[in-house]
């Protein structure tokens, strides 16, 4: 079983108290129903997609830190990357200007990244969209993220449950 399948199965069957704080049973059931409609692939996935694992060298991107690599859906990996860019909160010790720049460039960064990724792989943003709510739900119980980030993820999940595939 690939990492994606393992984590999503944990999400489906986890009985933790943390999970109950974030999503109602109806919301969790809706996310699971959405997840069950998605194809399960067995392709190489990085497992820790984030900008810190992308080095630029001679106009080429080099992906590093393959410790969490597994097989699964590359769309889930990409959804995690998009969620991180869209909702990450910078550490408070960084200058306020860094947050201003990040906030001003988040969506453009996602768009440019996905345009380039599609050219190389054929996977488009539309292919990744259905994965965003399930991956966001998984992040609520799997990652050590701030309460502010969790609130943004819950808002994203609820918005997507009302209007799937925004």
Image (tube, rainbow, N blue to C red):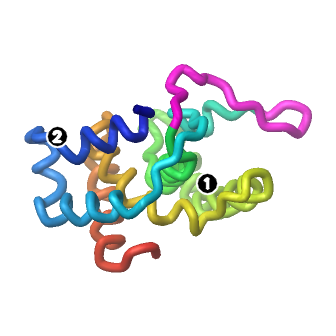
What residue is shown at x 78% (from left), y 37% (from top)? 61
Residue named by callout 1 = 101
Q: Please indicate, yes or no, whether residue 75 appears anywhere in the rendered image.
A: yes
105, above or below 96, in the image: below
63, above or below 141, in the image: above
Query: Helix, strand or loop at disc 1?
Result: helix
Residue 123's image quarter? bottom right
Left or right placement of residue 116 versus residue 129 in this view: right
Residue 2 in percent (x, y) is at: 44, 33
Residue 87 in percent (x, y) is at: 44, 53
What residue is shown at x 91% (from left), y 33% (from top)? 58
Residue 65 in percent (x, y) is at: 60, 23
Residue placed most toward the observer, 26 or 18: 26
How many marks can you see? 2
Residue placed most toward the observer, 120 or 139: 120
Locate the N terminus and report the quarter of the image it occupies: top left
Q: Please indicate, yes or no, whether residue 96 appears anywhere in the rendered image.
A: no
What residue is shown at x 36% (from left), y 71% (from top)? 160
Q: Residues within 10 Å of mark 2 (few under 14, many from 20)?
A: some
* Dot 1 or dot 2, earlier in sequence: 2
Question: Given the current orientation, which residue lies at the most extreme top position?
Answer: 67
Q: Which mark is residue 14?
A: 2
Q: Rounded to the nearest whole Å, what is the CA distance between mark 1 and mark 2?
A: 38 Å
Please report the bounds of the magenta region as a residue range.
56-71
Residue placed most toward the observer, 155 or 11: 11
Query: Helix, strand or loop at disc 2?
Result: loop
């Amino acid at each position: 079983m690939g990492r994606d399948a393992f984590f999503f199965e944990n999400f489906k069957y986890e009985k933790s108290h943390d999970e109950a704080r974030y999503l109602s049973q109806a919301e969790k059931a809706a996310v699971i129903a959405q997840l069950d409609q998605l194809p399960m692939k067995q392709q190489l996935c990085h497992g820790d997609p984030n900008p810190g694992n992308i080095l630029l060298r001679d106009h080429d991107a080099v992906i590093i830190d393959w410790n969490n690599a597994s097989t699964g859906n590359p769309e889930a990996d990409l959804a995690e990357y998009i969620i991180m860019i869209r909702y990450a909160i910078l550490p408070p010790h960084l200058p306020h200007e860094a947050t201003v720049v990040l906030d001003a460039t988040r969506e453009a960064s996602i768009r440019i990244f996905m345009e380039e990724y599609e050219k190389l792989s054929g996977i488009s943003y539309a292919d990744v969209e259905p994965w965003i709510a399930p991956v966001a739900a998984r992040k609520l119980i799997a990652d050590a993220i701030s309460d502010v980030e969790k609130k943004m993820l819950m808002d994203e999940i609820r918005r997507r449950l009302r209007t799937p595939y925004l």
